[in-house]
Amino acid sequence: MIYSADLQGTNHKLAVKGTGSPVPVEVNGHTYEVDFSAADGSLLSLLVMGRSYDADVVEEEEGVLAVWVEGETYRIEYQEEGRRPRRSTGATGHSVSGRQVITAPMPGKVAALLVSPAQEVGAGQGVIVIEAMKMENELKASRPGVIKEIMVQEGAAVGGGDVLIVIE
Amino acid sequence: MIYSADLQGTNHKLAVKGTGSPVPVEVNGHTYEVDFSAADGSLLSLLVMGRSYDADVVEEEEGVLAVWVEGETYRIEYQEEGRRPRRSTGATGHSVSGRQVITAPMPGKVAALLVSPAQEVGAGQGVIVIEAMKMENELKASRPGVIKEIMVQEGAAVGGGDVLIVIE
Amino acid sequence: MFNKILIANRGEIAVRVIRACREMGIGTVAVYSEADRAALHVRLADEAYLIGPAPSPQSYLKIDRIIETARLAGATAIHPGYGFLSENAEFAMRCEEEGLIFIGPSSHAIRAVGGKTSGRRLASQAGVPVVPGTTRDLTDLEVVQAVREIGLPIVIKASAGGGGKGMRIVSTEAMLASAIRATRSEASAAFGNAAIYVERYVGAARHIEIQVMADTRGNVVYLGERECSLQRRHQKVIEESPSPFVDPELRRRMGEAAVKVARAADYTNAGTMEFLVDPSKNFYFLEMNTRLQVEHPITEMVTGLDLVKEQIRIAAGEVLSVRQDEIRLRGHAIECRIYAEDPFNNFMPSPGRIRALRTPGGPGLRIESAIYEGCDVPIHYDPLISKLVVWGRDRGEAIARVRRALAEYVILGVKTNIPFHRKVLDLSQFVTSQINTEFLESWLAKGLSPENGAFAEIALIAGALYLHTRKRPTPTPVAQSGQVDSSWKLAARQDGLRRR
Amino acid sequence: MFNKILIANRGEIAVRVIRACREMGIGTVAVYSEADRAALHVRLADEAYLIGPAPSPQSYLKIDRIIETARLAGATAIHPGYGFLSENAEFAMRCEEEGLIFIGPSSHAIRAVGGKTSGRRLASQAGVPVVPGTTRDLTDLEVVQAVREIGLPIVIKASAGGGGKGMRIVSTEAMLASAIRATRSEASAAFGNAAIYVERYVGAARHIEIQVMADTRGNVVYLGERECSLQRRHQKVIEESPSPFVDPELRRRMGEAAVKVARAADYTNAGTMEFLVDPSKNFYFLEMNTRLQVEHPITEMVTGLDLVKEQIRIAAGEVLSVRQDEIRLRGHAIECRIYAEDPFNNFMPSPGRIRALRTPGGPGLRIESAIYEGCDVPIHYDPLISKLVVWGRDRGEAIARVRRALAEYVILGVKTNIPFHRKVLDLSQFVTSQINTEFLESWLAKGLSPENGAFAEIALIAGALYLHTRKRPTPTPVAQSGQVDSSWKLAARQDGLRRR
């Protein structure tokens, strides 16, 4: 089975060459012999060249895994060879074009709008403040652009993933 | 849904009268209004007349549940109305007849045979010793009878559930 | 002693109180909002009653509903935990009127010392140094005057403030007018009260607090200090006891000052005096928290006392179980507050369902948590989901231990600040305790990047194998039934494990 | 200090040692049998190597294989844990020859004091009272003679015995001959060695042991005692420290006796002297265990020391980190050994898969365990799956706490002796500590019946709802997304939770 994996913006090619354990796994052209054991649920134990790695994996959304290894958690988006790509995730999602879509990272309430339509914004500039769990959280533009659309008003309740602002 | 439940040899009739929560549940003719919440997996929380009960349930074999409630664990065999009964469980299983079938409660090794064919045995008399997890464990006849068959020899390895001795 | 206590709270502190009651043989009554039907405090309590919708003003802050529930359930005392109604004088008074025991100070004491300005007044009257500034609400003109007297930089604070909200640091005359306007408007919006006062801004200071405990017979003790300088947005992140900065002499002086303030307020039950301590070990009373603190476990671990049980005994009229001269601090304790938030995305809250949970084990650990695998972290409440508290023979062991424990702690489904804690614990400034209340913010200003990827390649492999084995039968080793050791007895001899 | 240690063990003790190494910054090498590929000690170690099939004689007892693995992995020291090779003088010697550090006493010391008869000899030479009896192996005739001298009742013990095997109590002349035969045959079968010796049978005595720790510079300390009288089949079930029976004077006398024996044997590292103590507080040396005990955590909790770290430092040539006069006992600790066995079916072992696991939390708990949800408890090894250890300010709090914790502990999939512990902890004889080594057996003789059914009806309902909801969508509360509190700010003020 061949996978394409996206980790923090970098793409990696993986190939699991067989079934059972140990199994050869190719990562970016380098092949490891991986002795692994999977318990019920999310637990994995990996032995690679004598080194032992404790891992825990949950699927946060289809194809997107949270992988805990030895105290560090990685969020990785996997695609099986020959499947069509899924939209990427994160607080501020962007499509391939210059368009930026600011979505609510969690359910909450619009505490403040920091921009107005047609306003120019710079990279890292705060555009909206969402309040949730007793904290105010500023969402920022990831790169320069112009405010195209503002879909919410101050005080409005928003659900996780709701589109808040569109920048072009 | 109506259930017949066997707990420590006593049979109980249960009826869950509806879906969702709270739901009326009838136990041996007495109906309770049960407010319950089931998390993923085995966890249950029950509120009955203001009392809160923390419960954890796993199915050990089909229809046989281990139910943990507030520190106590119960093993209960359930049958849905109109299903044919299952064989009961436990270290020494008996069929409805006077026949007793002594089975190995766990994988191990026959440390000692305490009886010989045609020998009379009394209730509670030890008939065979199984060794597992560094301990010797004596299996007893649950009621008087005569040794009909001995299917194993001393020193033999046995699997969980293997028939060891038949008493009539 | 009470035979039934209602816990007017949720989350880890409600669970903490329930456990103390269980160990004392006292019945427990939980209250819960619609968002908390499956919460751990509901599961663990003997009784549980719904008191309203998720928003706390309609549930956990509903005084009438809670008192009515106590009546209904036959509880004779109420433990407020922290937050919610714990410092609410009206709630304490209502309990007093209704003949219910409020497990905490009297409503009178809360009013006398709980308010920011009233506390400052009381402290300075008791001869305890306070941060230079005003001890009552001011008009805009009075603010300007006060600033002239105190000198810049100053902080304008909302009298009703809290949670790090409603404060503005002013370093130049020019900023003053707008800062006053801004603070007032924020204060009235946030706390429905535009009253403000002024304090000198003490910059490079430490935030160190003293735990006091007072019974109804006039006995008051202090239980050492807690170092709470590591804060983000004025919110504590990591606390430790004792403070590496405090020597026995300073501890005694601060402790005695705290006791003075408590006596001046006729204070009873558990309380905490917050102080600012400057580099030359001058300390200034900041405010008193008239209830149990989130970080109380570190004091329990070094003193060996159970503060919640002590609170309950005091409320039942018993005498303090220790005298000042019997209190010994042993070893060192550290608490990491674990929040459901994303440290790599501006600490964005991360509510949701706990999908995988593995808690660390072994020596010197204490976990105060209300989450379990499959539970939900609701959006409506504080994102504190667990407190990892460790004890070590000395500070070095405690630090090594908390690092070890954090590396074992698995929480998946929501994002947590565990990686943030791990980074902070590795900072030389933490290890040498060269810190003050501004340290964390200034360090964070440099920005925080995700795991550098020591295990990135392994994570990629693990994820692939996870997907891979979902489709195929997984090799899960099982105890080989039947295949039995042919030399049990030999092993039995060499193991003989049970004979120890 | 070592940079890599191999742990020649499995289960909770291997995990315990790995955690200590992690806190000391020492690399860890696990070894495992085919039955343990997914075991926790393999997961937690930095490296792990397969050393053979499930049966311990072919894996955890394979000296050559383990030493070869240490070489291969570049480990310079080996921690044997308890059981398996921990008291094997040959293994210690092999390590010495191969230039590996055996974390424990020298092979010489093991030989000098580890054997049952040699230990008795050494103790009496050192002037420490031993149970009257012989100090060497006997012929049948010598046994008869010895019995005449000592007087009945006596115990015939296998010199190589252990694990409660190979001993017979003889109360009448008539029983003697057959008892000798029986013990010899059982001994040769179980231990490949028919040698026996004789001790007077001390009936209503307590089993109390002293922890000693000795460095390589001639410093030896004792760390208080452990009360281990609660035994089943001569196997400890519940231990506590301090012993309610031991006063400071007796503690000092036993402690000094233990130190004497240790010095006489040139003993180094951790060791335990087992004593029988009769009702009039006379104590008799029984044997010395030349390694870490299963129940070492209770000593750690009352002394504040980490015995495993101390062992490692001593093995690295460091000086003991405490002097005798610095050792203070604080509070009270109790350990419950949790076994995978069925207390209601003659304590039948119960191997299998852990299907559900919820460990208790809160103050004063320590859980030493190697199980996790989904893991297997193999048939090949000791059924100890967890140690629940609690600390309390006094014995009363410790008892209340361990009861509370046992009521929270959920282990499903295998049967455990948790219900047994709960019954024992409720016995008045335990609460008042009116116990001896025979108490548990005699109490058990009355028979043990399952839960009386305080919650039977609830269990029936819970089970039915479990089956019921498997077929239908279950009402699982979720944080109401979107529906957001209209008065956040008010709540924010009254909560202000993070400001603590």
Image: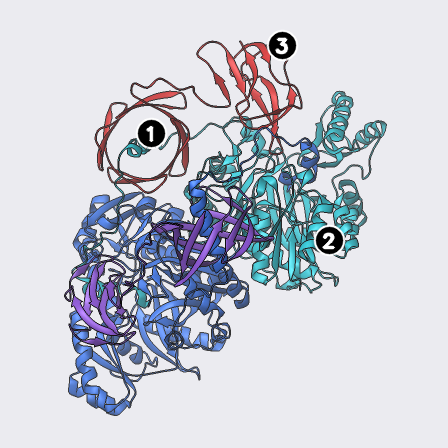
Chain colours: A purple, B red, C blue, D cyan
Residue C376 in sight here = yes
Discs 1 and 2 lie in a common subunit: yes
* D146 sits to left or right of A114: right
Identity of the amino acid at label 1?
Leu
Identity of the amino acid at label 3?
Pro
Identity of the amino acid at label 2?
Pro
Q: Tell me: residue C220, above or below residue C281.
A: above
* C102 sits to left or right of D291: left
As helix, strand or loop, the secondary structure at mark 2 comes to: loop
Question: On the image, numbered disc 1 is attached to which residue?
Answer: D460
Residue C278 in percent (x, y) is at 40, 82
Q: Quadrant of the C terminus of chain C?
A: top right
Which of the pair D15/C356 is nearer the observer? C356
Q: Tell me: residue B86, above or below residue C423.
A: above
- Report the residue at 16% width, 53% height from top: C64
CB atoms of marks 3 and 1 within 8 Å: no
Q: CA distance from mark 1 to mark 2?
A: 55 Å
Label 3: few (<14), some (14–19) or many (≥20) C-alpha neighbours in 10 Å: few
Q: CA distance from mark 3 to mark 1?
A: 42 Å
Question: On the image, numbered disc 2 is attached to which residue?
Answer: D105
Q: Chain of mark 3?
A: B
Question: On the image, numbered disc 3 is attached to which residue?
Answer: B117
